[in-house]
Image (tube, rainbow, N blue to C red):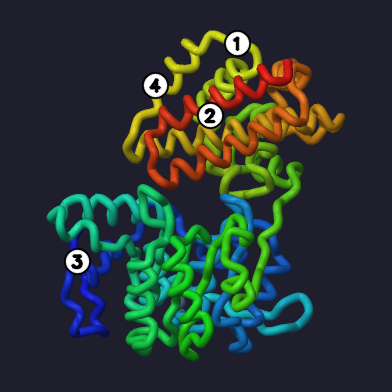
Amino acid sequence: MRVLWKLSAGASLHSPADVAFLLSVTLDTVTTPRSFDEFIGNREAIEHLRTAIAAGRLPHSLILAGPQGAGKYTLALMLAQAMECERQPRETSASGAEMAGFCGECSNCIRIAAAQNLEQKIEEAVAAREELREIDKKDTRVLIQTHPDVLIIPPDPPQLLIKIGQVRSLIHSIYYKPGEAPRKIYILTAAAFMKEAANALLKVLEEPPDYAHLFILAENPGELLPTIRSRCALVRLGALPAAELESLLATHHPEWKPAQRSLVARLAQGAAGRALSFDLAEYTACRLDALILLRTAISNPDHSALFKMTESYRAGAEGQQKTVALLRAVSSLLEDILLLQAGTPELIRNIDIQPELEKLAAAVDFGWIETASHALDQVESGLRRNLLRSLSLDAFATQLTAAAAERS
Ligand SMILES: [Zn+2]
């Protein structure tokens, strides 16, 4: 961590709470897209956005919705580059409309692209906060800023919610005109807000300054307050068909077997970024634990295997990630079990373990799956409140077992 950067616009702001992290403006090893052509899928939505930028009528508040890995963040950065690029290149769409582009080489483009590797930037910011004095830590917000006019606001760990302090930083900065680029841009990378944070954001959305643009990236826009949704335009990034993802994988991962590519294409649920970066070994390990959990809950009164497994899910950032991955795997198995019960096996995702899933599907009924999904939601909200992971996992399994017992 190199610099702590004070919001230059607000000279009177001196507390640690008003410090944003300026992360080193160096290009990462991650390749940054050089043009909109490198964005995979959703051609129509992209053209629409580029045309709006070229015409100067991009809505000031925009929700970019789509599944994890659909490229919401990549696209938000590209749109930011297109608005801030010093060279303002233009292209013509198939229908003859003028579309904005970006050069990828000017100082604005380069600095915005430096935020490309979001996960790493968040880790750096969180690590920097950890090094602060205890008293300063509490008030320090995690913000990513590689360009003075572009502020990226990720959900703050460990709760992974956008907090009031982060939105206050946005409010402090948004009423100062941009200093080095034509626009002020704010990218909120998740739709999960603390209540006060959502209410504070609402005030800004009512009347954002002319030069400001806000992007809210949402896996599920339904998570947002209806009052926030109604003040934003919505652009959806749709899922790519599995066959398209498979051929994409064939180009990028020729070393994978066809069966692996076909499995990953389904598991990625139409999201190109997710498919390309899919760690099959990690997912398989996670799914094994998810299977133990479900199998135990359904048919095994002996919980020792289960407790042994949940014991490995420890507190801390790593434990949290592992738990989130486990819950996602459980959720994908439950969906497949439901699809098998509904008589639509061709739609399941975990195609490599279909026989095992059929056995599970035969052992439960719809009511049990409903109970399981509800319990899963509860564990997830428990995680947000930072309850002990293994405890909530054990509680989850116990609840499922009770539901199974009730029905037998
Ligand atoms: Zn440029």
Q: What amino acid is found at the position of numbered circle 4 in the picture? A: Glu
Q: What amino acid is found at the position of numbered circle 1 in the picture? A: Asn
Would you say residue 110 is visible in this rendering? no
Asked if marks 3 and 1 touch (Cβ < 8 Å), the reply is no
Residue drawn where x is 68% and y is 47% of the image: 270
Secondary structure found at label 2 = helix
Q: CA distance from mark 1 to mark 2?
A: 15 Å
Please indicate whether residue 378 sits to the left or right of residue 131 in the image.
right
Image coords of residue 339 (percent x, y): 78, 33
Q: Nearer the viewer, residue 278 or 151?
A: 151
In which quadrant is the N terminus drawn? bottom left
Please indicate whether residue 290 sits to the left or right of residue 197 in the image.
right
Secondary structure found at label 1 = loop
Task: Tell me: is circle 4 under 8 Å from ligand 1.
Answer: no
- Residue carrying label 1: 300
Secondary structure found at label 3 = strand
Instruction: Report ligand 1 position as a quadrant.
Output: bottom left
Whichever of callouts 4 and 1 sits on the residue coming sooner in the sequence is 1
Whichever of callouts 1 and 2 sits on the residue coming sooner in the sequence is 1
Where 297 sits versus 163, above or below? above
Q: Nearer the viewer, residue 62 or 239?
A: 62
Q: Badge 3: few (under 14), some or many (20 or more) residues near its Cα, within 10 Å?
A: some
Q: Badge 1: few (under 14), some or many (20 or more) residues near its Cα, within 10 Å?
A: some
- Residue carrying label 4: 311
Residue drawn where x is 51% and y is 83% of the image: 88
